[in-house]
Amino acid sequence: MLRIGLISLSLRSGSLSRRLLALWRRNVRESCVELVEVDLRTIPSDWIGDEDVPLESGDFAPVAADLRSCDGYVLAYPVHCYTSASQAHWFIEAFGELLGGKPVTLLTAAGTSRSHLAMDDVIRALLFDVRAYVFPGNVQAVEADETADGGFSEELMERVGGAPRAFVDYCIALRSLSTPGARATAIPDQFVELFVPQTAPYVELFVDCLGYEVVHNLDGWVDLRRPGARLLLNAENPAQLKADHPFAEHRTATSRGYGVELAIVVDDLEPAHERAARLGWPIGPMQKRPWGVRDFRLTTSDGYYIRVTERPGP
């Protein structure tokens, strides 16, 4: 599972940058990523001195270990007088080696929109000193984005709403390029989307039995991937489809999966068969087919016909 480090560099409770980070966090579904939170105020204060920060031992080791395990980072910090807060620069200098080669996005809080120029020095430090990959969809909140009741404007809510998903996609793309074993999350040229009443049973089947990984799980829409394959699950009720949707005229006339067979190749057929049986799916027996490979079949209650087959030999 993808791990994202949420790093708050504000020294004040309830600050705008902390609230912006909380808003960003609420737009991430933890079923598709693991969030690792690092708060500047919990980092030991004995880093002021002439010696380098000891990342491998002492009080700093747990923070360094958390950061090292992440696939990407969200840095939230304030901007004062058109200048990025000094703690942002210190953090990059102290822990920058752990961010190198990984994606970073910035969330900043400032007085006016002109303060976006203050991001430049942090971005340059990340790019040239640390050699991190800076996500282009950074978000800045200003005082005008706050509402009288302590909330945020609709415009900011909209900007933040799509930022986490875009950053997660960015992290996945970079991880798939840099890690040979992580190509499960690369997007193939072809994929299938199934409209289902509930996504949870399908997620259980495809993840626990068939080797898929949950990349996104957002409001009834699930993105599942494995090497060379991508499957989307959509829990939208067909009765609520718009009149011009291609499925609208077939709401009740036919079963959802009529006329389509979904074939999934697995490396180990027996474990997949056993796990599917334990989950209660109506599976058939494993059989060797005339073309020389074994498989088993199941038809879901929604009418989707799935063939799980072993990999053919050379």
Image: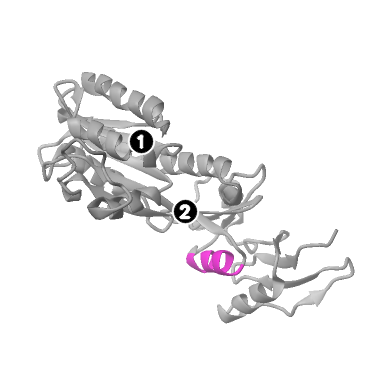
Q: Which mark is residue 240?
A: 2
**Which one is nearer the viewer's eye here, 307 or 110?**
110
- Which residue is found at the position 34% from the left and 31% from the top? 138
| Image colouring | one colour
Tag of residue 105: 1
Name the residue nearer the viewer: 51 or 180. Answer: 51
Q: Residues within 10 Å of mark 1 (few under 14, many from 20)?
A: many
The disc placed on residue 205 is none
Q: What is the CA distance from the residue labelled 1 to the residue labelled 2?
A: 36 Å
Indicate which disc, 1 or 2, sits on the residue closer to the N terminus.
1
Q: Position of residue 16 (x, y in %)?
A: 16, 38
Q: Residue 51 colored magenta?
A: no
Residue stretch in magenta? 200-209
- Against 168, is 265 above or below? below
Which one is in front, 149 or 38? 38
Q: Position of residue 49 (x, y in %)?
A: 16, 37
